[in-house]
Amino acid sequence: MLESVTKGGKSSTKLDELNDKLIRHGGELAAIDVALEHARRMVADLRQQAQAAEVEQANRAAAERAAKISATIATRLARVDDHFAHAFGELKGVIAAIDDLHAAGFDHPSANSFRVNSILCLKTVIGLLPRAWRLDMAERIEVAPHERKTFTSYWNAVQTSIDRQIAPRLAEPEKVEAKRRDTVAA
């Protein structure tokens, strides 16, 4: 029996054929393994590229959003500057009007009284800022609740006193009060 396998018999030929097939299949399996490994690497690379694209897209979206937010902040701060400029311009106008009031013979409010009360009004407004901002200011900005006021509330109190001084001079108190109410309403 060994002779038929080793000396070119039928069994030997069959064994050679099987060995050839095994070698071919082994080579094919090795090629498939190489192809699978290559495909795995390609899939991993594609996943990395997709993740990088997602990150890039998210970064781009965040940058676009940040640019819009920054533009909004710039617009708002420009308005803040405009409002402050307008407000301080109005205060200068009030100071000039108080000087005119003094020139007309009315000594209330005094320049010092207006200055002190204006500072309280400004501190009241500054008190609306976050606490950390107020702590950074050189002077204590806190205003006691009973001292808090607005320019409008301050002037309403002053104007009542002035109206009382004006009324007897005009002898028409109801017109003075009506004019004051119209001014406050506007």
Image: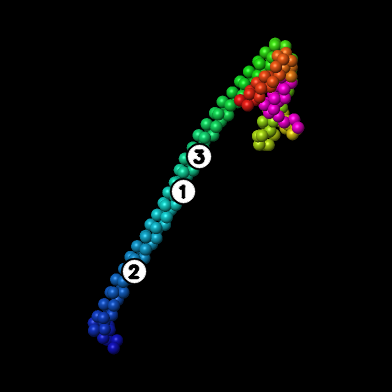
Disc 1/disc 2 C-alpha distance (Å) = 38 Å
| Residue 133, horizontal then vertical, whole percent | 66, 34
Magenta-highlighted residues: 146-163
Relative placement, left or right, of 63 versus 19 is right
- Of residue 88 and residue 97, the one placed in the foreground of this image is 97
Residue under label 1: 55
| Residue 5, horizontal then vertical, whole percent | 27, 84
Q: Visible in this render: residue 1?
A: yes
Quarter of the image with the C terminus is: top right
Query: Which residue is found at the position 65% from the left and 15% from the top?
Result: 96
Residue under label 3: 66
Disc 3/disc 1 C-alpha distance (Å) = 16 Å
| Residue 114, horizontal then vertical, whole percent | 71, 21
Q: Earlier in the sequence, mark 1 or mark 2?
A: 2
Residue at the extreme bottom? 1
Amino acid bearing label 1: Val
Q: Earlier in the sequence, mark 3 or mark 2?
A: 2
Local secondary structure at mark 2: helix
Q: Visible in this render: residue 119?
A: no
Amino acid bearing label 3: Ala
Give me the disc on residue 166: none
Give me the disc on residue 29: 2
Query: Which residue is found at the position 56% from the left and 25% from the top?
Result: 82
Relative placement, left or right, of 122 versus 62 is right
Amino acid bearing label 2: Leu
Disc 3/disc 2 C-alpha distance (Å) = 54 Å
Label 3 or label 1, whichever lies nearer to me, is 3
